[in-house]
Image: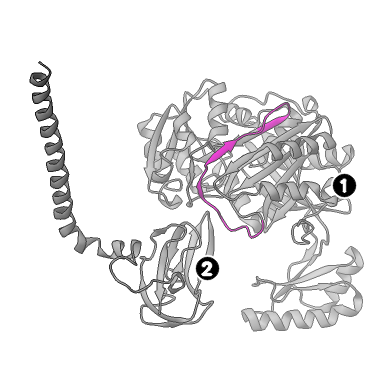
């Protein structure tokens, strides 16, 4: 087992990793920027090293400084957390070459999954379902053949596009000819390239992701799913496990497909395979090759401490569980609380003048906040995660409502109110919400 | 007997009071001396902090563009691009005059009114606080 781990992160996730290290009797080294000298992760660590000035690119992303910090503190492994260097394959590669253990997958797997096109190709070969489509539309006939096989609606997009230009949704046969012409024209005008492609269009998909964990001996298990469909501009707000719309059979099936794919690429560590889910079908989006923000909901319902297991595996231990040992019990929800205005989402850094954390059975708070702490403007706005666990979804929601009421964060604007509004909405309560939830402004 | 003990007491009291007066006078003097050289250095800050005391012109908050949030301010849309506005340029209400980066998001700072940019108080890439004066407009 490792003797000393350098935690190359900040905020709540640095604390989460630090606590796991404590329980495994591993010494911890915190790194911090000049802006974070007073931060909780620095106060709680056994040692700390300042690695640079406030901007992340000069401190938390400063690879030479971080490796030097690991050298002078005699650390044997580096945990990257999420964000920052966690999915930087070059960083992982440098550590591999210099004899430090990167607590995460091998650099080659980070590289593969970091490239959307290669990731999709790889997953397709491993029988992970992708959104069906046509890579390049060369004739109208291709489109007619496609819809005959896959049905409506479909979406046409510009190959060199972005920002909605050249995008057309086709819902019936009479629209095909005109839409293709328009898309080509718009694409030509906007990007000077009339190459267009086509995909099946998902109207109301859910974001469902599968948590997997693999050891160095190619033992792989999955830990069920998380429903993360409550998102605002691709930022998740509320996550839950299990999803109320998946049957036990569907869970088992998609879990097995994911495990088999991971096994065949020889992956190691924690990973999440993200899917869009609509009409009982899954479509691969991407794979995250790291610990995720929303990992606690999986921990609550499976009883597996993902961070401890991740560290044990990185140190060369075998998985502590077999697939049959994993049972999903009860229900867990996580609300992310950001330092931002709950209506305009304008960031709101500043000093916490009053702080009171909720508590009780089934209430978990992951946060590095304390009274008197000043949230610096340089980093991410997520300041706390509130996680509840109940014997079923209703109890979990009820506990979350009570806990949000109890939570006091004064001095800055935060999104507690937004979370409360979402929890009250009919769509959330029914569990039938989809990724368009926040756009449809059902929350007010 | 009473007189004997009271006389030195009175003298003591007098001396103490005198000392106090001397100390007060001295500290005032020191303060005045201190202020003399400082004035030239911190004139601008004194002016902005206490605008109504020395000069009689009334400074109107509307004449300034104020920082809407804490963050890092950028005067150019991208590195190596020209500034949004320069001193002496005319701007219209609603024009973007700067960008503030806070918590990995960028927000535009817009002109609160039309006019000529008289002074830019901040440097490109410097940290700004909520309510800080960024530009003055005439």
The crowding category of the residue bearing disc 2, from other C-alpha atoms within 10 Å (few below 14, some 14 to 19, many at least 20), is: some
Q: In this rendering, is residue A158 above or below A330?
A: below
The crowding category of the residue bearing disc 1, from other C-alpha atoms within 10 Å (few below 14, some 14 to 19, many at least 20), is: few
Query: Is residue B63 shown to the viewer in this render?
Result: yes
Q: Is A347 a magenta residue?
A: yes
Q: Which mark is residue B108?
A: 2
Labels 2 and 1 touching (C-beta < 8 A): no
Image quarter in which the C terminus of chain A is found: bottom right
Q: Secondary structure at mark 1?
A: helix
How far apart marks 2 and 1 lie (CA) works out to 39 Å
Where in the figure is residue A216, as x and y percent of width and height? 62, 31
Residue A286 placement, left or right of A282: left
- Label 1 resides on the chain identified as A
Magenta stretch: helix, strand or loop mostly: loop
Image: magenta residue range: A343-364
Residues B26 and A400: in front is B26
Give the residue displayed 47% in from the left and 56% down from the top.
B70
Query: Is residue A260 shown to the viewer in this render?
Result: no
Residue A296 placement, left or right of A72: right
Q: Is A156 a magenta residue?
A: no
Where in the figure is residue A112, as x and y percent of width and height? 61, 50
Give the residue displayed 65% in from the left and 84% down from the top.
A189
Where in the figure is residue A414, as x and y percent of width and height? 61, 49
Residues A14 and A183: in front is A14
Residue A103: name its quadrant: top right
Q: In this rendering, is residue A428 above or below A175?
A: above
Q: Which mark is residue A430?
A: 1
Where in the figure is residue A305, as x and y percent of width and height? 66, 28
Residue A171: name its quadrant: bottom right
Q: Secondary structure at mark 2?
A: strand
Give the residue displayed 9% in from the left and 29% down from the top.
B11
């Amino acid at each position: 087992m490792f003797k000393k781990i350098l935690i190359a992160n900040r905020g709540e996730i640095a604390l989460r990793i630090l606590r796991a290290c404590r329980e495994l009797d591993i010494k911890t080294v915190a790194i911090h920027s000049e802006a974070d000298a007073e931060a909780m992760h620095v106060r709680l660590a056994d040692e700390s090293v300042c690695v640079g000035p406030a901007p992340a690119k000069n401190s938390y992303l400063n690879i030479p400084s971080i490796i030097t910090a690991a050298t002078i503190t005699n650390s044997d492994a580096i945990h990257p957390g999420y964000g920052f260097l966690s999915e930087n394959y070059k960083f992982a590669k440098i550590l591999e070459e210099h004899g430090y253990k990167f607590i995460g997958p091998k650099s080659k797997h980070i590289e593969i999954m970091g490239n959307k096109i290669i990731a999709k190709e790889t997953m397709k070969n491993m029988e992970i379902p992708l959104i069906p489509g046509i890579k390049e539309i060369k004739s109208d006939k291709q489109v007619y053949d496609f819809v005959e096989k896959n049905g409506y609606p479909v979406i046409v997009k510009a190959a060199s596009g972005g920002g909605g230009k050249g995008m057309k949704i086709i819902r019936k046969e009479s629209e095909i000819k005109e839409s293709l012409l328009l898309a080509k024209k718009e694409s030509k005008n906007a990007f000077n390239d009339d190459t267009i492609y086509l995909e099946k269009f998902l109207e109301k998909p859910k974001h469902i992701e599968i948590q997997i964990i693999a050891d160095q001996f190619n033992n792989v298990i999955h830990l069920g799913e998380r429903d993360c469909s409550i998102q605002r501009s691709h930022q998740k707000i509320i996550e839950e496990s299990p999803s109320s719309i998946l049957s036990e059979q569907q869970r088992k099936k998609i879990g097995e497909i994911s495990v088999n794919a991971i096994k065949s690429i020889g992956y190691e560590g924690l990973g999440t395979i993200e899917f869009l889910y609509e009409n009982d079908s899954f479509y691969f989006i991407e794979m995250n090759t790291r610990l995720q923000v929303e990992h606690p909901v999986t921990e609550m319902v499976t009883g597996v401490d993902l961070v401890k297991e991740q560290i044990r595996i990185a140190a060369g231990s075998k998985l502590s569980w077999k697939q049959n040992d994993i049972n999903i019990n009860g229900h867990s929800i996580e609300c992310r609380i950001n330092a931002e205005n709950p209506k305009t989402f304008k960031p709101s850094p500043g000093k916490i003048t009053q702080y009171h954390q909720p508590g009780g059975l089934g209430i978990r708070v992951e946060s590095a906040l304390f009274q008197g702490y000043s949230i610096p403007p340089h980093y991410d706005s997520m300041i706390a995660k509130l996680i509840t666990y109940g014997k079923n979804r209703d109890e979990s929601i009820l506990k979350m409502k009570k806990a949000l009421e109890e939570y006091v964060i004064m001095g800055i604007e935060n999104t507690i109110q937004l979370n409360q509004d979402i929890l009250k909405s009919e769509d959330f309560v029914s569990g039938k919400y989809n990724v368009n939830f926040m756009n449809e402004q059902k929350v007010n | 007997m009473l007189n004997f003990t009271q006389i030195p007491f009175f003298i003591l009291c007098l001396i103490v009071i005198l000392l106090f007066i001397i100390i007060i006078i001295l500290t005032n003097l020191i303060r005045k001396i201190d202020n003399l050289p400082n004035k030239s250095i911190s004139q601008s800050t004194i002016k902005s902090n206490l605008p109504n005391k020395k000069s009689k012109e009334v400074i109107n908050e509307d004449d300034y563009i104020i920082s809407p949030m804490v963050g890092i301010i950028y005067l150019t849309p991208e590195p190596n691009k020209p500034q949004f506005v320069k001193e002496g340029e005319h701007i219209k209400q609603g024009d973007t005059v700067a960008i503030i980066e806070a918590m990995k998001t960028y927000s535009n700072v817009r002109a609160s009114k039309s006019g000529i940019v008289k002074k830019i108080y901040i440097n490109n890439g410097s940290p700004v606080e909520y309510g800080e004066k960024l530009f003055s407009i005439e």
